Amino acid sequence: MPIQIEAFVNSDDVFVAWRSSQLIPDCIGFELRRKLNGKVDIMQNRVSFSSGEPDPNKPEASDTSPIRRYAWTDHEPNEGDKVSYQAAPVIQTGNAAPKVDETQASLFSNEVELTGQISPSFECYFNRGLVMSQFMSRYLKGDLSSKSLSNFKSSLNDEQENKIRLFLGGDLRQRLIDLLDATNKNGGHIFLAMFELSDGILLEKLTALGERAHVVLSNGAHKNRDDDENKAGRATLKKAGCDVHDRMMASGCLGHNKFAVVCDSRQKPTAALSGSTNWSPTGVCTQINNIILINDASVAQIFMDQWNRLRDAGNDTPKDLVAANSQVKPAKTSTASVDVWFTKSSAEQEMDAANKLIAGAQQGIIFLMFQPGGSSMLDAIVKQQATNKNLFVKGVISTADSKQLDKAQVTLVQRAGQQVQQFRIVQPQGLHGVGNWAAEVMRGQFLHQIGFAIVHSKVIIIDPNGDNPIVITGSHNFSASASQKNDENMVIIQGDHALAKAYAVEVQAVFDHYNFRAVAKSMQEEGKDVVTVMKDPKSWQQNWFQGDKALELNFWLGAAAPLAARAAAASATPVAATSAAPAAAIVAVPVIAPSAAPRHPAKHAAAAKPAKHARAKSAKRAPAKSAKPARAKSAKRTSAKSAKHARAKSAKRTPAKSAKPARAKSAKRTSAKSAKHARAKSAKRTSAKSSHRSR
């Protein structure tokens, strides 16, 4: 049976997963090939193995340093690029030289295009706010002192955007700027309800709108009504003639919205913007955040009505506002149903609605959360996983409830009386003392020097490949306080597969990034050598046929044979004696595999991938200048590889499932020739290429 392979995409990343029907004997990993705008190349493993020691500073092509995974996140393509992938096992029998086995190679996957315009009604964008990462360690040149971090934070709000801001802000930053510029150019109006508004660039764009910028502005994080975190931004807007309405919340309550309504010149609503992003330098750059733009007049009107209610409420939360918030506002777009909720609500009605959907999950639930505390929604996720052992559950919580968190293991060990399996839910942290990996900004340093939020997105994705894919997002922290005390919004979108998959790609990338660090820290605390478990070239494969890794492939590729049957098939397959590994290694290796995708350790430079490709091309080179000379050469060479998205239309590939045998053979022969040519090119380039994406 041929290897099954499929690619999934959002505006910034491509996630590719593949699966074999059984363990591949003597497989030491995969050569992964990418067809980018019609050109086939061999992808690099972000960690090399040729020296015998895993080395994140000398990435190599995956034919010589095979990828020891059945899944991979590709950060290199740009918005507008069209890509597909092929996986070919690399076999090493005994002490023989490794060799790619073309007879077992997959066909090329489905072709996907990177775009924020996920479907007719929805756009979604993400930033690259991973300060605890290898690329930031290199950018800071190893100086993780308080002064260095303070200077870095200050630089994010310079009058002129610098290269690291462009990179960290990613597509999210660019879409916000484009949205404000387009509104201004078209003579439109924009209505905002904001928790924080301090980003200099976004303030500049708003002041250019003058009286056509209408802002309900809260006092941010505060001690009392007179304490105003947005004092400077408020004064700037008022001086420019913007229409500003103060919403000064009492102590313990937050005006936590971050939504916008885009209107035409007659103030007719046309689109609504929601998500987790505060309009501050840290919100745009140093926290993991998302925005969703809903291009639907009926949804926009729902948010416009709420803006008017907040304006009229002033500094209070009257009973009529609570009553209105406690009722769902439904709408239908061309691709999905949309339920919009607002808070403060009277009895956590919005959380009850979400919990009912969580209880119906069939394939999986993945999520990003900030500070859910004693959340009924997180409890519902854990309960559903306990009820359905075949449910794939993974998530990252920026700061978990200390009463329910085993800090030494960095995992939640109890939720609602249910045991949570190790490393299914992780808390962000940096990396220290692991082989040749650079020391990173640690959790305590970030919270003290940068800000309170590491992962700030509030996203739950349910069954993205199922019959009823669901995305839950907005400003709501999925916590009781968000429901009982704050101004919030929660948007529940059902039925749009493309949107759910795009969000799932983001969650998978963030989880993989922090899961690697959680496992490494746990092993260090247990006195284990993190690097040693990476060296065994054959034991890595077993975990992908059982347990969490098999569930992960089922989540992305659809259910395979029952797990018990797959495990039996795996154990019955002859494997070289050297593939046996200690029980502890079998658990750790696939999770800590150094080829697992980190989150954007440079996107070939330090710039965002803006909607306008020309700007992205020049901006992307930025961090390479601050890196070592070898990396600078790599950035120049790699950026040349990034073709303009108008270039070279890629021929669509026939899916492997529908290909007739004769065509499949022909496709394999063709791809083998292409791969051979690509390997020859890659071999020449490998020494010059130093990937920015190693952990």
Image (spheres, rainbow, N blue to C red):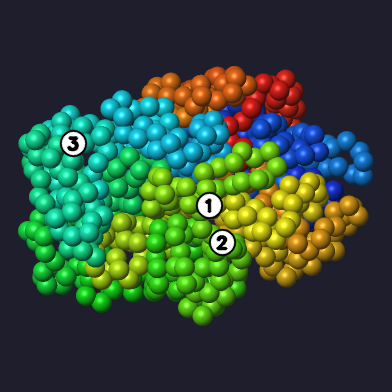
Mark 3 vs mark 1, foreground winner is 1
The total of numbered circles placed on residues is 3
Above or below — where is 357 with respect to 299? Answer: below
**Residue for badge 1:** 429
| Amino acid type, label 1 | Gln
Tell me which numbered mark, 3 or 1, is placed earlier along the sequence.
Answer: 3
Q: Which mark is nearer the camera, 3 or 2?
A: 2
Would residue 477 be found to the left or right of residue 362 on screen?
left
Mark 3 or mark 2, which has the lower sequence index? 3
Q: Secondary structure at mark 1?
A: loop
Q: Is residue 283 visible?
A: yes
Q: What residue would you read off at disc 3?
A: 206
Q: Is 304 drawn above or below residue 316 in the view shown? A: above
Q: Residue at x 64, y 27 (%)?
A: 690
Residue toward you, 631 or 90: 631
Can you give x and y, in whole percent of width and height, for residue 416 in the image? 48, 78
Residue positioned most to the bottom: 417
Amino acid type of the residue that numbered disc 3 sits on in the rendered structure? Leu
Toward the viewer: 327 or 289? 289
Q: Is residue 122 left or right of residue 299?
A: right
The Cα atoms of the two marked residues, 2 and 1, are separated by 9 Å
If the image is split into quadrants, where does the C terminus sit? top right
Near mark 3 (Cα within 10 A), the count class, few <14, some 14-19 or many ≥20, is many
Callouts 3 and 1 close, C-beta under 8 Å: no
Q: Badge 2 is on which residue?
A: 410
Q: Nearer the viewer, residue 267 or 191?
A: 191
